[in-house]
Amino acid sequence: MLFSNRQKKLILDVLLKERRRLFSKHKGELLDKTIEDLSQMLRNEEVNAEPKDNVIDWSRKGGKRR
């Protein structure tokens, strides 16, 4: 199942709130790892979504090679 960026942010917010609850039965390594992975996923999407101004378009490079 694929989630949109907004859905992932919502899930991450809910997980972060759950981690802060004093008597949460979900605290532990799995919750921490899930939060870490989801945060990384969102960061990666943000980086990959940015337009890349420094990309060389080789098809526009003029001239023949000899």
Image (cartoon, helix red, strand yellow):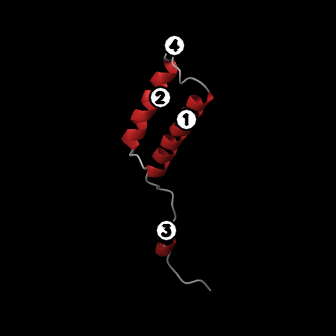
Q: Could you tell me which residue is drawn at 51 percent across and 57 percent down?
A: 54
Q: Are marks 1 and 2 in contact (CB under 8 Å)?
A: yes
15 shown above or below 46 = above
Going by the picture, which residue comes out furthest to the front?
A: 25
Helix, strand or loop at disc 4?
loop
Q: Which residue is mark 2?
A: 15
Going from the N terminus, do you reach mark 1 or mark 2 first?
A: 2
Q: Residues within 10 Å of mark 3 (few under 14, many from 20)?
A: few
Disc 3 versus disc 2: nearer the observer:
2
Q: Position of residue 14 (x, y in %)?
A: 43, 28
**Viewer-closest of 55 and 35:** 35
Q: Earlier in the sequence, mark 1 or mark 3?
A: 1
Residue situated in front as seen by the camera: 9 or 11: 11
Q: Which residue is mark 3?
A: 57
Q: Amino acid at mark 1?
A: Thr
The residue tagged 1 is 34
User: Cβ–Cβ below 8 Å for labels 3 and 4?
Assistant: no
Q: In the rendered structure, which amino acid carries the disc numbered 3?
A: Asp
Marks 4 and 1, how far apart in space?
Answer: 19 Å
Q: Looking at numbered disc 2 in the image, what kind of residue is underneath it? A: Leu
Crowding at label 1, few (<14), some or many (≥20) Cα neighbours within 10 Å? few
